[in-house]
Image (cartoon, helix red, strand yellow):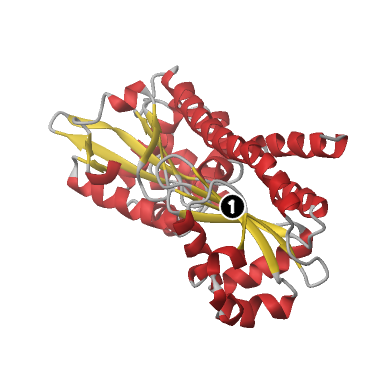
Amino acid sequence: MDSYDVDLIERIYTASVIPEQWAGVIDRLSNRMAGRGGSLFLLADGQLSWAAPPATHSVMEEYVAGGWDKKNPRLSALLARAHPGFIQDRDIAGKEYDSLPIVTEFLRPRDILFTAATVIKGARDDLAVFSIDRGRAGGYFTPGDIAFLDRVRPHLARAVALSGRLKMQQAATATAALAMIGIPAAVLRKNHTLYAANALFQDLIGEVFIASAFGRLSLGDPRADRWLKQALADNGRAATTVRSIPINSFAGVIGVLHAIPACHHARDLLGEGGTFLVLAQPKDNSVVDPEWLRWLYDLSPTEAEVAAHLSRGLTVGNIARVRGTSVSSVRTHVKSLLRKTGLTRQTDFIRSVSSLAAISPAILRN
């Protein structure tokens, strides 16, 4: 194996830690095969993502936008074949390959005539599909080309598996950090199933949380459960603000469940639509940084200031006097911040904000 190939393998394992590097890996493989690009499609937890080098990135955007990923018999044949290596499209699609709509309407007009691909199956129903494309000038993949790709395939498989394990470890670390300060926390996938949870959170399953079918969670408090389902549905539509849900039991207030959507670096861990759940207890005389409230709830500077005053126990009238404005103006800001947090009562909001004093902002921002 020459230095070029060694560098390729190093890049593959780098991509397991830094997903943005997968496009470079595919580009490297394509160059090694005298190709014109390729792609990686990942299906994990019911969520599809993809990567492609600059040469074929726009083609892949058109592929997904045109819905070809849902009407591609090449992929169905590849999955059915279950071949433990790379294989050419023509070898799995049969004699009808040249007449397939995806070939005549999409691939040929873009000079993608030859493709070698492989499917790598992970835990549960996770799949990774790597493909390398050639145009008319490149011609068919030779047995030697396929043999090289098959030698690289175990490294691709290990890198994909390693990436999944790293994400699981990151999720476990995030929840463990909150356990150290006594806060139950969990991570949910886009499909609302439990991905990771610390021991404090697990202890509440059966008491506060109810384990439903297919690994999903519900809340014993019916009103809070409705709010949680709405928050998770909003997160699935790429929401970017926190929903705070007061939870009650027969003994009274348990705490406030903060449903924090995946954003910024958290998307690398959870993907779009993932959710971080944190159950915090309200604290008396708590003071919360207005800037943190702005970040969590997407509040305006004035709304954040009003929220901080409410958390200190000030009434609407007190806040109006402190800010030198009218009571009606303050009430307007209160209504707005209640709407943004998904709460209907001012007392619930105060309880929610007070619970945030127990949580380090750095833990949720990382």
In this view, the residue in front, 296 or 99, is: 99
Where 239 sits versus 246, above or below? below
Tell me where residue 98 appears, x and y as whole percent: 61, 79
Where 38 sits versus 244, above or below? below
Label 1, residues with CA under 10 Å away: few <14, some 14-19, many ≥20: many
At x 73%, y 59%, the residue is 141
Quarter of the image with the C terminus in it: top right
Tell me where residue 225 appears, x and y as whole percent: 24, 47
Where 237 sits versus 245, above or below? below
Is residue 216 among the parts visible in the rendering? no
Quarter of the image with the N terminus in it: top right
In this view, the residue in front, 324 or 165, is: 165
- Name the residue beneath numbered marker 1: 118
Most distant residue in the right direction: 3
Looking at the picture, which amino acid does disc 1 mark? Thr
Most distant residue in the left direction: 250
